[in-house]
Structures are given as structure tokens and as C-alpha cells.
Image (cartoon, rainbow, N blue to C red):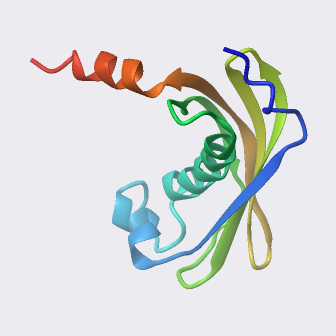
């Protein structure tokens, strides 16, 4: 299948507010009440995944296959955060994004993220086949 609508330069963003549930202390990734790296990454992935989801035929979706992210600045509870994803490479069913996360004071993280296009039903069946 040809996914010609996925083009270099397409962009999408996602935003959220940092809550107590988003802190490193809450998700056990640290001991402080600041935005947890896994929560920042989830927002980054959302920006990328939502972009692809809007374009693909209904029977396809994308799954994350790699991340190379730096979390460069702390963000306290109550601050708005956003993530912007831009497609920088498309290679058949593999899509590479550059992603930047920011809070109200500026950049808090950046990196690269790869997603792979899959057939929803086949992928789910493959995952479900692991159940014993």
C-alpha cells in the first residue's frame, strides 16, 4: 500500500497541563514533583501518532518503534506543556519525526521518534496470540 499523503514537513502538536499525576514522584521515575520524563515522552508520541492517524486509511495505524529523547529542563505542576512533531523522513512504512517539547518558559526536551505503519487487525491479532 502506498502512503503518499505522509510527507516530509507535515507537523502536528499536542498540549497538556502538568498535574500531580504527571510528576516523577507519582510515576516512580524520580523523587521530585516535576514533569516526569515518561509523561513528556507520551505527549511527544501523541503529537506524532495523531498526525499519522489523521492521514492513514481507517484500517491502518502507526506504532512507536524508537525514541531518542533528551529531557533538558524541569517543569513544575500547573504549567502548560506542548509537543510539536514534524515528519523529517518517510521510508515506505517507517516515519521519522523531530519532536520538541516546551513549557511556558521555553524548550524542555527534544529528540527523534520513529513510528511504523501497521494493519490494525493483523497487528492486534499478533499481539493477542501471545496470550496463553
Across and down, in percent, residue 120 comes to 44, 28
* Side (left or right) of 21 relative to 11: left
- Image position, residue 40 (x, y; %): 58, 57
Height in image: 28 above or below 87?
below
What residue lies at 63% left-to-right and 73% top-to-bottom? 75
| Residue 41 seen in render | yes
Left or right of residue 52: residue 62: left
Is residue 31 visible in the rendered image? The answer is no
The quadrant in which residue 23 appears is bottom left
Q: Position of residue 29 (x, y in %)?
A: 42, 54
Q: Residue at x 75, y 29 (%)?
A: 96
Q: Nearer the viewer, residue 83 or 1?
A: 1
Q: How many marks?
A: 0
Residue that extends furthest to the right in the rendered view of this protein: 9
* Residue 95, x across and y down, in percent: 72, 27
Viewer-proximal residue among 40 and 5:
5
Q: Write the residue at 69% across / 66% down.
A: 82
Would residue 114 be found to the left or right of residue 97 on screen? Answer: left
Q: Up-down: is 126 above or below 47?
A: above
Residue in view at x 60 percent, y 33 percent: 57
Q: Quadrant of the C terminus?
A: top left
Amino acid at each position: 500500500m502506498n502512503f503518499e499523503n505522509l510527507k516530509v514537513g507535515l507537523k502536528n502538536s499536542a498540549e497538556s497541563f502538568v498535574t500531580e499525576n504527571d510528576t516523577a514522584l507519582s510515576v516512580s521515575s524520580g523523587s521530585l514533583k516535576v514533569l516526569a520524563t515518561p509523561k513528556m515522552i507520551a505527549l511527544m508520541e501523541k503529537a506524532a501518532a495523531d498526525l499519522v492517524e489523521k492521514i492513514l486509511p481507517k484500517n491502518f495505524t502507526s506504532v512507536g518503534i524508537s525514541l531518542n529523547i533528551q529531557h533538558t529542563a524541569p517543569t513544575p505542576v500547573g504549567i502548560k506543556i506542548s509537543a510539536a512533531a514534524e515528519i523529517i523522513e518517510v521510508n515506505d512504512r517507517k516515519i521519522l519525526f523531530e519532536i520538541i517539547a516546551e513549557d511556558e518558559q521555553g524548550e524542555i526536551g527534544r529528540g527523534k521518534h520513529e513510528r511504523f505503519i501497521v494493519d490494525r487487525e493483523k497487528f492486534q491479532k499478533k499481539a493477542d496470540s501471545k496470550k496463553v
